[in-house]
């Protein structure tokens, strides 16, 4: 190390250890180095342990304030350093990682899991919590919920086990956390490793200009001639929809559906099997028959039986229509290619598109020119303003972690500061696929009464701009934006005392309600009229196209429903295992979701969803993927109120904000929903919206 480097290292402070000195105390990404994370993690653990020692050594009798609030906040004069660094690190691990970050994650994961276990298995701390829990009168509903969550969190983490049981639980949780991390890292590497490189322009036949331009730009970025297509959805989806090159569609399909099952270091087959078994062992060690039973104790569904009732009701309602939808696509394919043509999965998107054109004279490329990203942003922000009165102002002084990211200040209808909102729009090398909402800072009210406002972020993989055109989105991408924005509203409107109860910290089969609710607006004429203008001419989206959008909203809706149900069945099949899982995953998968599959759907292929099913292997949806359909029942029922009173009705929107969006997990979600809706939801509104049967709302 040179003298200059030594002086710089000695004088430089770790940015996590001091005030950020940024707008709204936002993360100073420009000052953070990879080496800062490990130092901050270790100091955060030390501070946590110091705070816990003060709590358990307190000679005063345990009270809600000196025990539960101390456990919740862990601040005692400090900001929550461990929470601060964890939020940044793990968000970057999903949105902007590299080999150095991945290696550090492998190193820190067991240390962090051990620390979490040390806290939850601390006998003296649990005794204080238990004492407060037994004397839980005279608490507000929110305080009672925090206390119950705290006590139950200790119990569900093994506090009632004997020493041998606690040690066993430590081993199981540490192993599953490492395997979940390995699963995600393998998936990212496999997805980013593949590309379809085309140098013969004839092989681009059928592809729209937007797809060609994007592929040409990707090729230039990789210093290649011609065109490059990847497994990122803005590249993959148009190729599968428009390419006339059947063999290339097959190559793309098989690449996407065989990731992490090759004979290499990124194979996830055994990892998935082990994760399933570890979670079963954890649940059984804690006294539950299955991992699903353990999870569903804190879900609206409450029991395995109720999940299956929902999934089987959906199959019964939607499968007859789905069979007809699939049959229509096959008929068109045979009519186009000849009677001997046998449709394969890589043909489905291609001929579905042709059928949509035939029935509605509509496809996503017709709409792209009207969905320029900056206008979509204006439309989505404008919708939030019209519903809730909030406004967004980009602030380029707020540091961001990548040039693609935009940072906004959000102001409430009275002009007061509400939140910081980050939007990360496009795919890139170090970014996981899909779309999600997260936080760099949650909301809570500190002991001085200051309402600490949240810093929320939505991360997506939307179509990128090219040298020739701005980012022009599909209607599906607009829906994705609305979905994640709905989650962000849940975070931004949070207004609770305790951070662990604020925003999206709710039961998993309730968390998708605000997001799926927002998707309804994507096909509403009044909303489209506010932002859908041609990016070149400024002309509004034509009336006839809007009519076609509305008419086609239920195109293949039953097939889409069964796809979601099939994934719910697969999830439940893994996590209702009572004995050691030793079966072949590929064969097991095909059996698990068979009831939701259609005849001749190509289930004999050597492909596998499980090894890339991040939601249930590395995310929070294990034994909970049904939540999307559960919440869809809620969102259809809730949006029905807006349809009757006006989709922009401010009074109804205020009720939705007051009773659902701002309350977080402070009460049972059904109590919150009934307060807004006036009654429990039924499946009827969803069936009516999807045009399935004649149902009363």
Image (cartoon, rainbow, N blue to C red):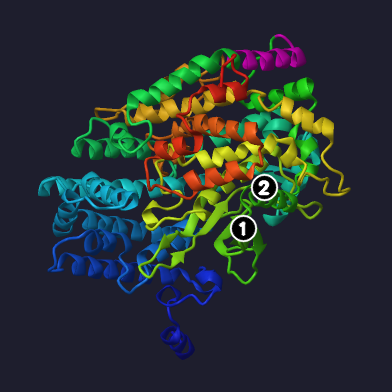
View extreme (top): residue: 339
Q: Residue drawn at (29%, 48%), measured in percent from left and top?
A: 149
The quadrant of the picture occupied by the N terminus is bottom left
Residue 129, x across and y down, in percent: 19, 55
Mark 1 lies on a secondary structure that is loop
Q: Is residue 412 visible?
A: yes
On the rendered structure, is 348 left or right of 451?
A: right
Is 331 contained in the magenta span? Answer: yes
On the rendered structure, is 50 left or right of 224?
A: left
Q: Which residue lies under the disc numbered 2?
A: 383
On the rendered structure, is 184 left or right of 198?
A: left
Which is the main secondary structure of the residues drawn in magenta?
helix
Residue 606, x across and y down, in percent: 49, 26
- Front-lying residue, 403 or 620: 620
- Front-lying residue, 85 or 632: 632
- Which residues fall within the magenta stretch? 323-339
Residue 625: quadrant of the picture: top left
Q: Nearer the viewer, mark 1 or mark 2?
A: 1
Q: Residue drawn at (64%, 32%), measured in percent from left and top?
A: 643
Q: Residue drawn at (33%, 49%), measured in percent from left and top?
A: 141
Residue 75: quadrant of the picture: bottom left
Q: Which residue lies under the disc numbered 1?
A: 413
Q: Residue drawn at (11%, 47%), measured in percent from left and top?
A: 164
Residue 124, x across and y down, in percent: 14, 59
């Amino acid at each position: 190390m040179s003298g200059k480097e030594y002086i710089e290292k000695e004088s430089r402070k770790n940015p996590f250890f001091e005030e950020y000195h940024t707008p709204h105390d936002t993360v100073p990404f420009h000052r953070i180095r990879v080496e800062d994370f490990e130092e901050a993690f270790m100091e955060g653990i030390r501070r946590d342990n110091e705070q816990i020692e003060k709590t358990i050594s307190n000679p005063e009798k345990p009270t809600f304030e000196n025990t539960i609030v101390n456990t919740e906040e862990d601040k005692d004069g400090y900001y929550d350093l461990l929470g601060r660094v964890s939020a940044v690190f793990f968000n970057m691990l999903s949105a902007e990682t590299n080999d150095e970050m991945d290696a550090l994650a492998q190193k820190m994961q067991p240390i962090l899991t051990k620390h979490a276990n040390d806290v939850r298995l601390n006998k003296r701390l649990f005794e204080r919590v238990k004492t407060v829990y037994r004397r839980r009168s005279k608490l507000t509903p929110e305080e009672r919920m925090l206390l119950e969550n705290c006590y139950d969190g200790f119990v569900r983490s093994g506090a009632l086990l004997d020493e041998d049981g606690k040690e066993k639980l430590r081993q199981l949780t540490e192993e599953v956390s490492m395997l979940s991390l390995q699963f995600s890292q393998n998936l990212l590497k496999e997805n980013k490793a593949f590309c379809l490189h085309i140098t013969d322009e004839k092989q681009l036949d059928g592809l729209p200009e937007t797809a060609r331009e994007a592929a040409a730009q990707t090729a230039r970025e990789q210093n290649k001639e011609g065109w490059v297509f990847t497994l990122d959805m803005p590249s993959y989806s148009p190729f599968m929809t428009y390419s006339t090159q059947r063999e290339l569609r097959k190559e793309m399909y098989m690449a996407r559906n065989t990731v992490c099952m090759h004979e290499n270091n990124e194979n996830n087959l055994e990892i998935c099997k082990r994760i399933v078994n570890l979670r079963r062992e954890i649940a059984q060690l804690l006294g539950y028959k299955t991992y699903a039973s353990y999870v569903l104790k804190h879900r609206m569904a409450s029991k395995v039986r109720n999940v299956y009732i929902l999934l089987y009701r959906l199959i019964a309602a939607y499968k007859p229509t789905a069979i007809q939808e699939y049959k229509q696509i096959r008929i068109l394919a045979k009519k186009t290619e000849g009677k001997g043509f046998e449709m394969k999965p890589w043909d489905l998107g291609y001929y579905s598109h042709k059928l949509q054109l035939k029935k509605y004279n509509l496809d996503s490329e017709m709409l792209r020119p009207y969905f320029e990203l900056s206008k979509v942003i204006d439309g989505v922000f404008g919708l939030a303003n019209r519903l809730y009165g909030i406004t967004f102002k980009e602030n380029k002084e707020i540091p961001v972690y990548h040039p693609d990211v935009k940072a906004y200040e959000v102001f409430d209808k009275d002009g007061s500061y509400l939140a910081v909102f980050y939007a990360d729009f496009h795919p890139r090398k170090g970014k996981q696929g899909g779309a999600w909402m997260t936080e760099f800072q949650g909301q809570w009210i500190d002991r001085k009464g200051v309402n600490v406002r949240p810093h929320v972020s939505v991360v997506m993989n939307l179509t990128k701009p090219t040298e020739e055109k701005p980012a022009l989105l599909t209607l599906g991408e607009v829906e994705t934006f609305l979905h994640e924005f709905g989650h962000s509203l849940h975070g931004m409107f949070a207004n609770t005392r305790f951070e662990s109860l604020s925003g999206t910290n709710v039961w998993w089969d309730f968390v998708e309600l605000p997001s799926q609710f927002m998707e309804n607006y994507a096909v509403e004429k009044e909303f489209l009229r506010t932002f859908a203008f041609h990016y070149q001419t400024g002309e509004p989206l034509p009336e006839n196209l809007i009519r076609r959008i509305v008419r086609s909203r239920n195109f293949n809706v039953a097939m889409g429903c069964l796809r979601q149900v099939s994934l719910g069945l697969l999830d439940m099949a893994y996590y209702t295992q009572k004995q050691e899982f030793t079966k072949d995953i590929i064969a097991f998968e095909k059996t698990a979701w068979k009831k939701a599959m259609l005849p001749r759907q190509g289930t004999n292929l050597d492909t596998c969803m499980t090894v890339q099913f991040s939601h249930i292997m590395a995310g929070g949806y294990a034994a909970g993927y049904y939540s999307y359909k559960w919440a869809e029942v809620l969102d259809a029922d809730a949006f029905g109120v807006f349809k009757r009173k006006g989709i922009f009705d401010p009074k109804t929107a205020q009720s939705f904000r007051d009773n659902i969006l701002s309350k977080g997990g402070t009460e049972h979600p059904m109590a919150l929903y009934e307060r807004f809706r006036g009654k429990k939801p039924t499946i009827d509104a969803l069936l009516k919206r999807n045009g399935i049967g004649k149902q009363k709302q």
